[in-house]
Image: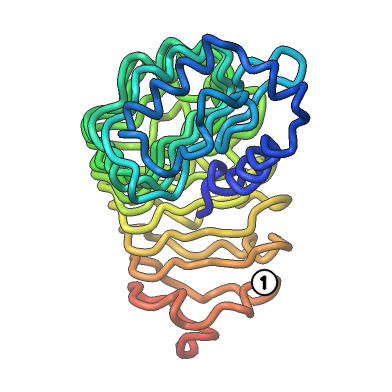
Amino acid sequence: MASTATLLLPLLLSTTCFAFLFSPATAALCNSDDKRALLAIKAAFNNAYHFASWVPSTGCCAWYDVDCDVNTGRVTGLSIFQDANITGTIPTAIASLPYLRILVLHHLPGLTGPIPSAIGNLPHLVQLTISFNSVSGPVPSFLSSLQSLTLLDLSFNSLSGSIPASLSLIPNLISIDISRNHLTGPLPPALFQNASQPAYLRLSHNNLSGEIPASYSGINFAQVDLSRNKLTGDAKLLFGREKQLQQVDLSRNMFQFDLSNVVFPESELILVDLNHNMIFGSIPQQITNVPNLQFFNVSYNRLCGPIPTGGQLARFDSYNYLHNKCLCGTPLPPCN
């Protein structure tokens, strides 16, 4: 499943490029304290060539990777991405950009070490993306101090430990992506309890365990990806006819519940992947009422009975149903 941060990144990067188009008057607005902080960041990254445009004789609002408020000249965005020559740890000087709203450190394989506590001192931060790097250590509990945060993407790193329950204290957080790390422990039950918009939760390719908290039944999820963990129990609570769920991937876990009783959302749902679990029962006929279904996989479970006919199910081949207890009917062999 595509991450929200991944979907937003091209827009953010194109926005950053407009820094080059600022007028000289706008560039001159560059705040002197912000300029000092940026030059400290450059120094912390060993003055890598990536920062060649960051020279003291020019206004920092015209520097590559930097966005400024056009009225105040304060730095509001810093997006450093796709450079294997940038090495070191996340500079604490980032905390000296007090008006920062967007921080993106993406695809920097030489970026190592833990997430510094200084990141917690950015009160206006709306998006924090530290993804596709070599960052390690825990998901820090001090992220809860980022009370303006709506999107958190820490995917594709080497983070370990549990998901801090304190993330639930961020009032406007609607998107969490910590997939492709080494997380362990349970899902925090209070996540997204105050979300006013559909929530996005992506935690695939970790070592999370336990059951989906009962409190998640009341969350209006848009996307859920819990694939390739060690989660157990009943996942029916994620579904419901009136929910706005678009994509749900629970594959390669140890979920065990009766699929016969599941009522699928009918308005937005496009992807359901339940393969490699211990799900039993039958495929409900109601799935044929989902008009926009593009992917459906229940292979490697314990399902029985005839595969429903109609709706979008005709587009899926036998691969999507193989290795169940006694599923039958098109595209599998006929039922006896």
**227 or 17, nearer to the observer:** 17
Q: Residue furthest front?
A: 57
- Dividing the picture into quadrants, the one containing residue 57 is top right
Residue 205 visible to the viewer: yes
Q: Residue at x 58, y 33 (%)?
A: 63
Relative to 16, say whether 252 is above or below.
Answer: below
Q: How is the image coloured?
A: rainbow
**270 or 255, nearer to the observer:** 270
* Residue 264 percent across, percent down from the top left: 61, 52
Question: Which residue corresponds to mark 1?
Answer: 312
Q: Residues within 10 Å of mark 1 (few under 14, many from 20)?
A: some
* Residue 252 percent across, percent down from the top left: 32, 58
**146 or 110, nearer to the observer:** 110
Q: Amino acid at mark 1?
A: Gln
**303 or 167, nearer to the observer:** 167
* Residue 208 placement, left or right of 83: left
Tag count in the figure?
Answer: 1
* Residue 143 percent across, percent down from the top left: 40, 18
SS label for mark 1: loop
Q: Residue at x 33, y 76 (%)?
A: 323
Relative to 33, say whether 215 is above or below.
Answer: below
